[in-house]
Image (cartoon, rainbow, N blue to C red):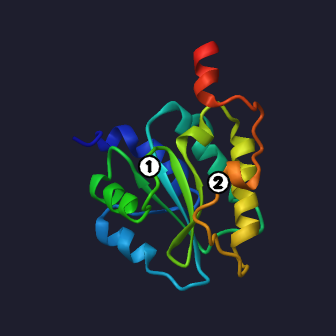
Amino acid sequence: MPYPEHFVSPMRQELTRLGVEELKTAADVDTAFDMGSDQTQLLVINSVCGCAAAMARPAVALAMQHTTKPDRVTTVFAGQDLEATVRARDHLVGIPPSSPFMALIKGGDVAYVIERRHIEGRSAQAIALDLVGAFDRFCGTDTTAEDGPESPETMGSHAEDPMSSSFRSIIR
């Protein structure tokens, strides 16, 4: 059962006020993934969780201030846009579901991902720097992720703490 709209509306607006396009149906998602080989899109799977509020959505806002950006920025809301979220995850073959989540798509293929595990325990600024690095690498260039999606682990992360988020949550 989806969250009540009045509950998630302010969380949606944190992204839509930045010009992020909501994808609310499976057809919207399919249309968004139908792109030219040189086109880029940032897909944000939004969430009600605290790490989405404190880190993920603010990171997107910071990254969108960078001069190099994807051609399109879209979002689905996990727990609300159920059909759209399922379809978005169908396009993310081999990537385990998580939310919040961000994927930079180039030419319909996933080039870079930031999963929940890359978000928890990190600052919005560090996550934004990871996004900006991906924007610089893949947006407006001929670069593709030939060996599958890259991530903060493969491109080098701006993490403040080298300890995994799972271990941080246990010892703190």
Tell whether 143 sits left or right of 99. Answer: right
The residue depicted at 39 percent of the width and 61 percent of the height is 88
Tell whether 17 sits left or right of 145. Answer: left
Tell me if residue 51 comes above or below residue 45 in the rendering: above
Residue 65 at least partly seen: no
Q: How many marks?
A: 2
Tell me if residue 18 comes above or below residue 49 in the rendering: below
- Cα gap from disc 2 to disc 1, whole angstroms: 13 Å
Asked whether the beta carbons under mark 2 and mark 1 sit within 8 Å of each other, the answer is no
Farthest residue toward the top?
171
Crowd class of label 2 (few under 14; some 14 to 19; many from 20; radius 10 Å): many
Q: Toward the viewer: 61 or 40?
A: 40
Q: Quadrant of the C terminus?
A: top right
Q: Secondary structure at mark 1?
A: loop
Name the amino acid, label 1: Pro
The residue depicted at 54 percent of the width and 41 percent of the height is 116
The residue depicted at 61 percent of the width and 75 percent of the height is 71
Query: Residue 9: horizontal and vertical position, in percent?
Result: 40, 45
The residue depicted at 59 percent of the width and 62 percent of the height is 149
Q: Toward the viewer: 63 or 113?
A: 113
Q: Secondary structure at mark 2?
A: loop
Query: Residue 95: horizontal and vertical position, in percent?
Result: 47, 54
Crowd class of label 1 (few under 14; some 14 to 19; many from 20; radius 10 Å): few
Query: Residue 59: horizontal and vertical position, in percent?
Result: 66, 47
Residue pointed to by mark 1: 96
Displayed quadrant of residue 151: bottom right
Name the amino acid, label 2: Ser
Q: Toward the viewer: 147 or 35?
A: 147
Residue 33 at least partly seen: yes
Residue pointed to by mark 2: 151
Q: Quadrant of the N terminus?
A: top left
Displayed quadrant of residue 107: bottom right
